[in-house]
Image: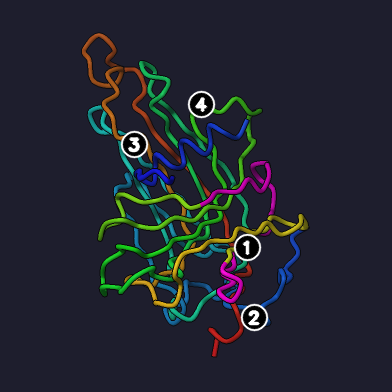
Amino acid sequence: MRKTMKYKAVLTCFTILFPIMLSFPVQALEPIAIYDDFNLPFINPEKWIGMDSYNQESIREIVSKSLHMSIRTSSINGYGFKGFNHLSLLNSSAITAMEASLKVNKLHVQGCLSDPNNVTRASAMLFGTFFNTAQPTPGSYENDVFAHVVIQRNSISTDPPGSLKVFGLYYQCTNPSCTTLNIIDAKILGTVQVKTNINVILQWDQKNHQFIFQLNHQPPVTSTYTLPDTSLPGVPVKALNVQGENDNSLCTTATTATTAGRPQPMAFIDASFDNVYINQSATQ
């Protein structure tokens, strides 16, 4: 039986369980084609639309023919937070496969000193909605199915400095804003290092009712589902994203007078994306 939980709680649970570039299709359902190699001096408005929220600092720009994205977001008065900076692909409804090269340049996660279970996470990812399991309501995420490939580090990680976990997951939203959800499956893809170029793939195989995830040259990882998948999502979106978040609980270390000056929970991540591919039919 699946559990209903908030997205940030899902990522916390999954990351606690965790103890060069080459572009190629994985189990190609149709040919893939380049969507953007970021060779223009500015982000192409005919291909992308940006959005960010709840950040103290946010950057989205072209640097050295790559997409540079970063955020810094932190707790206010000790409360939890979730900040994001993402760039959405246009014509998202037609996209069933996404591939991109990615490098996390640097990141920092500060947890709550008074509560080790209050976890901060910094992530870079590809994500999208792919179908709705019922009758979709335009503008509502309810019953939309999201899938992600995530590169992440959290504040309680015991991995060596600079080590990041990579995983694929997908879930069904259970309310219009997708603040509650049913996680369907999550797959560990591997471990990578900061300042290392990687290639990631996220693909929906509707015919075989499965999602396909891949990291670099490693074998594709598949996950099959039994959900109805013939309806378009209520909110069609495919995006590149950097994100920082902290559990939605009060961190007393950051609020009491006796601990004034101690660091607030905070997440910072700086990443570069390049060579974004999608299924060829979505480029036409």
Q: Nearer the viewer, mark 3 or mark 4?
A: 4
Q: Nearer the viewer, mark 3 or mark 1?
A: 1
Whichever of labels 2 and 3 marks the residue nearer the N terminus, that label is 2
User: Is 204 one of the magenta-colored residues?
Assistant: yes
Mark 2 sits on what residue?
33
Q: Nearer the viewer, mark 1 or mark 4?
A: 1
- Amino acid type at circle 2 is Ala
Who is closer to the viewer here, 147 or 192? 147
Give the alpha-carbon distance from disc 3 to disc 1, as whole Å.
33 Å
- The crowding category of the residue bearing disc 1, from other C-alpha atoms within 10 Å (few below 14, some 14 to 19, many at least 20), is many
**Residue lying farthest to the bottom in this orientation:** 284
Q: Nearer the viewer, mark 1 or mark 2?
A: 1
Label 1 sits on a secondary structure element that is strand
Whichever of labels 1 and 2 marks the residue nearer the N terminus, that label is 2
Q: At x 51% / y 26%, what residue is drawn? A: 156
Give the alpha-carbon distance from disc 3 to disc 4, as whole Å.
17 Å
Image disc number at residue 138: none
Asked if disc 1 and disc 2 are in contact, CB closer than 8 Å, the reply is: no
Image disc number at residue 74: 3
Image disc number at residue 212: 1
Give the alpha-carbon distance from disc 2 to disc 4, as whole Å.
39 Å
* Predominant SS of the magenta segment: strand
- Amino acid type at circle 4 is Ile
Q: Residue 39 location, x and y as percent?
A: 60, 74
Label 4 sits on a secondary structure element that is loop
- Amino acid type at circle 3 is Ser
Mark 4 sits on what residue?
156
Q: Quadrant of the C terminus?
A: bottom right
Q: Residue 229 location, x and y as percent?
A: 46, 72
